[in-house]
Amino acid sequence: MDKRVMVTGATRGIGRELVRQLTVLGYGIFATGRDAALLESLKAETGCAGGVADLSDPEQAVGIYRQAAAELGQVDVLINNAGLNNRKAPVTDIELADWELQYAVNLRAPMLLCREALKEMGERKSGHIVNVVSTIAKTAQPNYAIYSAMKYGFMGFTKCLIKEGREKNVKVTAVYPGGTDTDFRAEQRPEYLSAASAARMIVHCIEAPADVVVHDLTYRPMVESNF
């Protein structure tokens, strides 16, 4: 078995493609998501291990990391891919519950998972943390205040983590995909990146030579111009 990888948000979109592509390359995978049926179909398709978790619950977020480490033996690569954008609305229309849910999933959960990974990886002076942020953290749009705030926060956290990881010989990569045609959004956008293409770019970061760390990778579909 090659490196052992934990992928969050693995049952759909970019996460599912990551599991497919990394499995073909010989990686051992622990996949996690909220949808039990989709997770079981992914396990049947790829042979990956996995477990269901609701990352909005901090205890489940920490627990699923420990389950992954136990089942894989250790987590060599953590890919924080899970995220949601459940509410696009003007600031004046936002409810407190909207802020709290997106904070829980888009910022708190990956921070907790990074903490757990850095503890273990730091002790053995080896490992790689990949945080899938979003190009929204590098621009601004009306009605995206909640999602943008969480992704800007995730970007800032990851920039600090890059420096702390370096001190422990742990690679940290922040990935900023542009518009991707997945069911993350209701409307189809075939002119956007395919999930397979978006995942392939992340795989390139993981497959980089041992003496190379990709700190920041920003990529977009050619049609995108909001930067």
Image: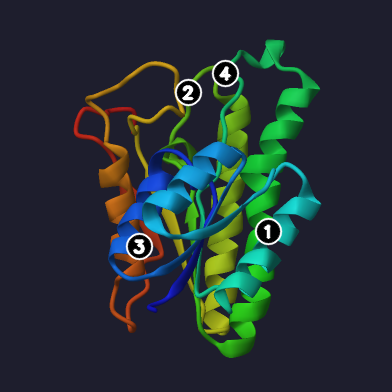
Residue 43 at x, y = what percent? 47, 52
- Relative placement, left or right, of 122 versus 213 is right
The residue beneath circle 3 is 23
Amino acid identity at mark 2: Gln
Judge the density around disc 1: few (<14), some (14-19), many (≥20) Cα neighbours within 10 Å: many
Judge the density around disc 2: few (<14), some (14-19), many (≥20) Cα neighbours within 10 Å: few
Q: Earlier in the sequence, mark 1 or mark 4?
A: 1
* Residue in the foreground of this view, choosing between 104 and 7: 7
Q: Residue at x 62, y 46 (%)?
A: 153
Question: Could you say which disc has been placed on residue 141 in the image?
Answer: 2
- In what quadrant of the picture does the N terminus appear? bottom left
Secondary structure of the residue carrying tag 3 is helix
The residue beneath circle 4 is 88
How far apart are the alpha carbons under marks 1 and 4?
Answer: 29 Å
How far apart are the alpha carbons under marks 3 and 1?
Answer: 20 Å
Q: Earlier in the sequence, mark 3 or mark 1?
A: 3
Amino acid identity at mark 4: Lys
Residue 85 at x, y = what percent? 56, 28
How far apart are the alpha carbons under marks 4 and 3?
Answer: 35 Å
The residue beneath circle 1 is 64
How far apart are the alpha carbons under marks 1 and 2?
Answer: 34 Å
Which of labels 1 and 4 is toward the front? 1
How far apart are the alpha carbons under marks 2 and 3?
Answer: 36 Å
* Residue in the foreground of this view, choosing between 22 and 44: 44
Which of labels 2 and 4 is toward the front? 4
Amino acid identity at mark 1: Ile
Secondary structure of the residue carrying tag 2 is loop
